[in-house]
Structure formats: structure tokens, C-alpha cells
Amino acid sequence: MYALVDCNNFYASCERVFNPNLRNKPVAILSNNDGCVISRSDEAKNIGLPMGAPIFKWDNYCKQHNIKVISSNYPLYGDMSDRVMKILSQFTPDIEIYSIDEAFLQFKGFENYELNSYGKDIKNRILQWTGIPTCVGIAPTKALSKVANKIARKFLDETNGVYVIDSEEKRIKALKWMPLDNVWGIGRGLHKKLTAEGCVKAYDFTQLNSEMVRKKYSITAWRLQQDLLGKPTMELDEEKDKKAIATTRSFEYTYSDIENIKERISTFATNCAEKLRKQKSSCHMIIVLLRSDRHKKDLEQHRVSKTVILPYPTNSSLVISKCAVEAVKTIFKPGIRYKKAGVIVTGLVPENNFQLDLFSKENPKHKPLMLAIDQINKKYRSNSIKLANQDLERTWKMRQERLTPKYTTNINDIIVVK
């Protein structure tokens, strides 16, 4: 059996843990640079605030309906997510972290367990230890556990947040209830094609000829159909090293001077290097991106990238930052107001297994230096040590005018009990 554990309105729930005054009130969380709504509490949904609403258009609407609008606080959300996932690992060793707020669990050897009670134990422990409300869907396959989770979330009072599909009768009833476009794994393209086949509910999709689905659509669609039929074809995904690592961000303001852009590129490159070292990889290639503000149609536009091939693989922040900064200097165009930049490292190889070069190699002092920097930054859970060409005050320069404290990741923001 599989379980899908999903945190309810995760970003809003994190804020409510530390500010109980937000409970039972409409809350909306904004994207980077306070752009648009990316998370809403149930109360905000019921009022009619749409997902993705640009806040500059909906600000007055939020004020009229007393919707609390908050800047996204990613350090807080990431830390709370880590706490939830660690709790889930106590219930089974087989876990796949699917996103920041949901995870699949596999129950091997749990034949004698009463899974509805076990699901409630999971839900209650997470709520007690973190304050985050969750819903749990349990079923014989991953796709059906997604369906069960949606039922638990939709009918919260009847299910108490936990629903188990453990019989053929429950499976058929659930699929006849589930709209086709709400099925996990069915995107707009596939939904359009299946609608032409006469499919309205998830159950209709399972009644199509399996060989026809495999030949006409794809092996992925066939696997999804088999999963919905109760035949496990999608196992838990193992954590794999990434084949490329990217850090791209929009600036809080448009920049037209090279010095500010060089500082941002250095920060992005350093972040990529840290991620490389974390997965014990090195890169052969760096791609630097620079974009103007596409929304400012009256201004001259400029979209450009530069690829740098390294003479040897590296994960040194010093080397990657230097190469990225040199690259952005060659593509920067004076007079353009840039809004977004990014660094991508690719051509990844294991850091201790790559082809050596007879004539060029990395400074041997870099490796122990990077190790020392990573250890210090990990110990103090912040970027305590940075390169000299980085902004020492902030990692990401984003517009966050409604930001809440970092309650769990910054010692100065810890709640004081009086």
C-alpha cells in the first residue's frame, strides 16, 4: 500500500503556526518580488481570490475583504518542510519526497496494520509536533493514493483528513467521483485527447483499451491507467543526482549598471557551486543568462546567454564565480534595464572521478578551502562566509515588503515567550 501525505495550504499554514491570529482568516502568500498569489488559505479561496492573481491588480480587493497578504518566507517554509519529512520517515523507511509539502510513503510488511488508524497517527503527530495540518490518502498504488488524498481533503469532516481505498468497491466509487482533469499525471494535452474519446471521469479513462492507450498515447499514460486500475506500475522514485543545476532570479528592481549585475551573477554562481559540492559533483560548463523586463514593452529588450567551457571540471565557488562574472561582462549591453539573470552549471561529473588534464588543473588549495566554508555555513545555518564581490547583507535581493520573521532559521527572529 502507498500513502500520499499532503500539507494543507502549506505556506499559509506555516505562517499560522507562528501567528495564531491568522487562523480562520483569509491569507494569501506572494511569489518572488511580491508578484502574484502562489498560495491561499481556504478562506481566501472561498472569497474568490484566484491563484496567480497579480497583487498590483488585486491589492484593493484584498483590503476590501480583509485578506492578509504576506511575502513568501522560503527559509521558514523549507525548514518546516524538513521537519514534516523527518516525522514521516519515522513511520516507514520507504519515502519519496514529492514536493515541499507532500510525500509518498510505501508500506511494505504492514499487512496486519489498520491503515486508517495508522494514517490518523501520521496526521496527528505532524499536527502536534509542527502545527501543520495534513491530509492522508492510502491506496494500493501511487495514483490511487493521490485520489484518496483528494477525497480526504474534499470531505474533511466525513474522513477526518484520512481516507483509505482498500476495496474494489471504494476504488470504482472514487474514480467515478474524480473529474478527469483532476487526475494526477493528466495534463491539458492528454486531457483534451481523452475528452475526445468520451472520457469525463477518471473511471472512464480506466475503461479504455489498455493496448490502445499504450500505442495511441504513451507508456506513461498506460502506466497511469494501470495504476488507477489498482495494478502498481509506478514505484517510489529514488533520489538521483541532478544532471544540471540552475539558479535564476528576478531582481527586486531593474538594473542598468554592470556592477549590480556582476554581484548578482557572483551570488548565483556561488549558490550553484554549493549545490554541486553538496551532491559531490563538478561541472564542465557554465551558462550565464541575462534578460530585460519583458513587461516593459516601451523599453528596448535584450535576451542573451553565454556558454563557458571550462578547461577542467570544478565545483570551486572561486572558479565558477570568476568565470560567470567574466561571461556576463561580455554580454552586458549598456542602456538596457535588466530584470532577470541566472547561472546554470552542466556537464556534471563525480568530483573524484574525471579525466585529468596534463597542462591545466585547479589550484589544490581550493578543495580544503571550500570544505571549510561549507562546514562553517552549515554549522551556523546561513551564508556566514561569502566571496568579496557578493553583497554581505543579503543572498537574494527580492522585493519582500510584507515579509514575516524567519522564526526557525534566524536566532534574532525566535519567538520570545513572556
Image (cartoon, rainbow, N blue to C red):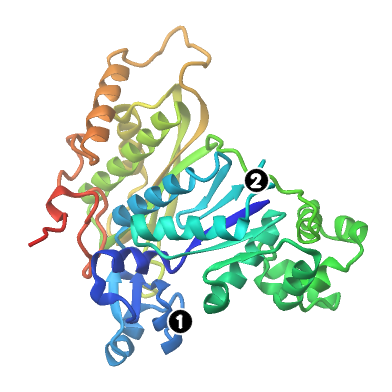
Residue at image position (81%, 69%) is 205
Q: Mark 2 or mark 1: which comes first in sequence?
A: 1
Q: Residue 344's x, y, as percent?
A: 44, 42
Give the image location of residue 270, x and y in percent: 31, 37
Instruction: Give the amino acid type for the residue marked by disc 1 in the picture.
Output: Pro
Q: Which residue is mark 1?
A: 50
Q: Residue at x 33, y 89 (%)?
A: 61
Q: Is residue 141 above or below residue 35?
A: above
- Name the spot of residue 213 as percent of width and height, x first: 86, 60
Which kind of residue does numbered mark 2 sit on? Phe
Residue at far top of view: 358
> CA separation, marks 2 and 1?
41 Å
Q: Is residue 155 left or right of residue 165?
A: left
| Mark 2, residue position | 110
- In this picture, residue 196 sits left or right of residue 271: right
* 261, above or below 161, in the image: above
Q: Quadrant of residue 140?
A: bottom right
